[in-house]
Image: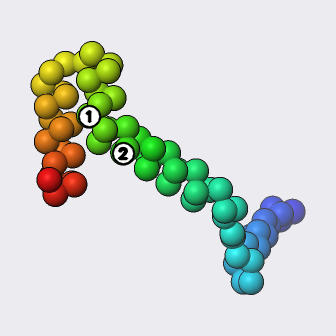
Amino acid sequence: MSAPTHTRPHPATTGGVGTRLPWWALALPTLAFITLLVLILNPSDAHAAGGDPAVTHLLERVQQLVGGR
């Protein structure tokens, strides 16, 4: 009596099926990044928070470098 042979499964076909992301899959992370960047670069918010003066000075310096002032 012979052992049964196993057939290999068919490989998944990749022809013609494209994946599309919805518009918000790119827009939301971009919006979050821009929002956080604006919060970081705005030194008035850093002063209002009463944070560490060294962090405030660093944020002001970054704003000067980015803003060209």
Q: Count numbered badges in the picture.
A: 2
Q: In the rendered structure, which disc, 2 or 1, sits on the residue that comes first in sequence? A: 2
Q: Residue at x 44, y 48 (%)?
A: 33
For label 1, the residue is: 43
- Which amino acid is tagged 2? Leu
Q: Residue at x 72, y 83 (%)?
A: 15
Residue 34 in the image, given as x and y percentages of width and height? 43, 50
Q: Are marks 2 and 1 in contact (CB under 8 Å)?
A: no
Quadrant where the N terminus is found in the figure? bottom right
Taking 4 as reference, is 11 above or below it? below
Q: Quick one: SS at disc 2?
A: helix
Viewer can see residue 11: no
Residue 14 in sight in this render: yes
Looking at this rendering, what residue extends furthest in the bottom direction? Answer: 16
Of the pair 39 and 11, the residue shown nearer to us: 39
Identify which residue is drawn at 18% across, 38% down.
60
Quarter of the image for residue 27 reads: bottom right
Above or below residue 30? Residue 41 is above
Q: Please tell me how crowded label 1 is: few (under 14), some (14-19), or many (20+) other residues with Cα within 10 Å.
A: many
Q: Give above or below for 68 relative to 49.
A: below
Q: Nearer the viewer, mark 2 or mark 1?
A: 1
Give residue 54's position: percent from left, percent from top.
12, 25
Q: What amino acid does circle 1 point to?
A: Pro
Q: How is the image coloured?
A: rainbow
* Residue located at (16% from left, 57% from top): 68
Please name the residue that numbered disc 2 is placed on. 37
Q: Position of residue 26 (x, y in %)?
A: 57, 59
> Looking at the rendering, which quadrant does residue 51 occupy?
top left
Image quadrant assignment for residue 21: bottom right
